[in-house]
Image (tube, rainbow, N blue to C red):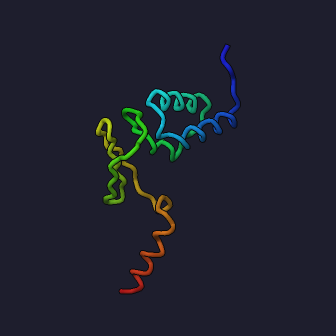
Amino acid sequence: MRNKTSKSDTKKEIERFFMHIKEKTPAEVKKIKRLAMSHNISLGINKRLYCKKCLHPYIEPGIKIKNGFVNTKCEFCGYIARWKLHMKDLDETIMPIHEEKACAR
């Protein structure tokens, strides 16, 4: 019989997993994805921490920002993941710099 865990315990386990993702293997990423799916838990922003194709965690990915998209290239398989860049994703410390430049013109 399978060991049943609660949804809150599963969320905590997933959070702990993604805190140390750089030390994980693709098999462990696959396992945690299946755990999240079985409990109907969204991984949210954590999906951007590993390659969608080969499931290797990003260690030193190639990142480019162009035309409102973030392109991340996997260093293992070469797959390029693209995400739309939203204003809420930007760091709040960058915004005052842009406002100062706009006022200087």
Q: Relative to 3, does residue 97 appear above or below in the rendering? A: below
Percent of width and height locating residue 77: 30, 35
Quarter occupied by residue 8: top right
> At 52% across and 27% down in the image, what residue appears?
31
The residue nearer to you, when weighing 13 against 67, is 13
Residue sitting at x 52%, y 32% = 33
Is residue 93 shown left or right of residue 9?
Answer: left
Q: Which residue ends up furthest to the left in the rendered image? A: 78
The image quarter containing residue 56 is: top left
Task: Using the image, determine if residue 93 lies above or below residue 5.
Answer: below
Indicate the quadrant containing the C terminus: top left, top right, bottom left or bottom right.
bottom left
* Residue drawn where x is 62% and y is 31% of the image: 39
Residue 53: give x, y in percent of width and height.
Answer: 37, 34
The residue sitting at 50% across, 40% down in the picture is 21
> Which quadrant is the N terminus positioned in?
top right
Q: Please provide percent x and percent y for residue 50.
A: 43, 40
Work out whether 43 lies above or below 39: below
Q: How many marks?
A: 0
The picture places residue 102, in percent across and down from the top left corner, at: 40, 81
- Residue at the front extreme, as displayed: 23
Where residue 104 sits, quadrant-wise, is: bottom left
For residue 33, side relative to residue 69 (left or right): right
